[in-house]
Amino acid sequence: MSKREELPRELEMAERVRPLVNEILERFNQENITPPEAGMVVLALISRLLEAMESQPEPRRYFILTLINVINNYLLQEAGEAPQSCPGGTCGPE
């Protein structure tokens, strides 16, 4: 699949999971979860996801690269530099 074909699929997936992300954030608010606690939840989910994806090397690699891209773009913004564009709106929550 070409990069041009992947983008619509990624955008579709981002739109599909957006309501779930919003529900999770709302739940964190209802439970008075602090940002550091929310971060630990996210890290635990990432760890479990990587374990679950062990038998799927390509999707696992793509997920890891996307995660690195999100972190790099955040660090670039913190440093005052313009981040690169992100596929499918995966550069972070909106």
Image (cartoon, rainbow, N blue to C red):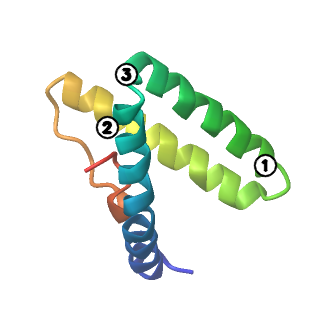
In the picture, which quadrant includes the N terminus? Answer: bottom right
Q: Name the residue that disc number 2 marks.
A: 73
The structure residue drawn at horizontal position 42% and vertical position 40%, both measured from the top left corner, is 27
Horizontal and vertical percent for residue 60? 69, 52
Check the image and name the residue furthest to the right: 55
C-alpha separation, residue under disc 2 versus residue under disc 3: 20 Å
**Image check: 55 left or right of 37?**
right
Image disc number at residue 35: 3
User: Is there CB contact under 8 Å for labels 1 and 3?
Assistant: no
Q: For marks 2 and 1, give the CA distance.
A: 26 Å
Return the disc, 2 or 1, that comes first in the chain's sequence: 1
Which label number is shown at residue 52?
Answer: 1
Residue farthest toward the front in the current orientation of the protein: 30
The answer to which of 27 and 63 lies nearer the viewer is: 27
Within 10 Å of the Cα at label 1, are there few (<14), some (14-19), or many (20+) other Cα atoms?
Answer: few
Which of pointers 2 and 3 indicates the residue nearer the eye?
Answer: 3
Side of 55 relative to 44 (left or right): right
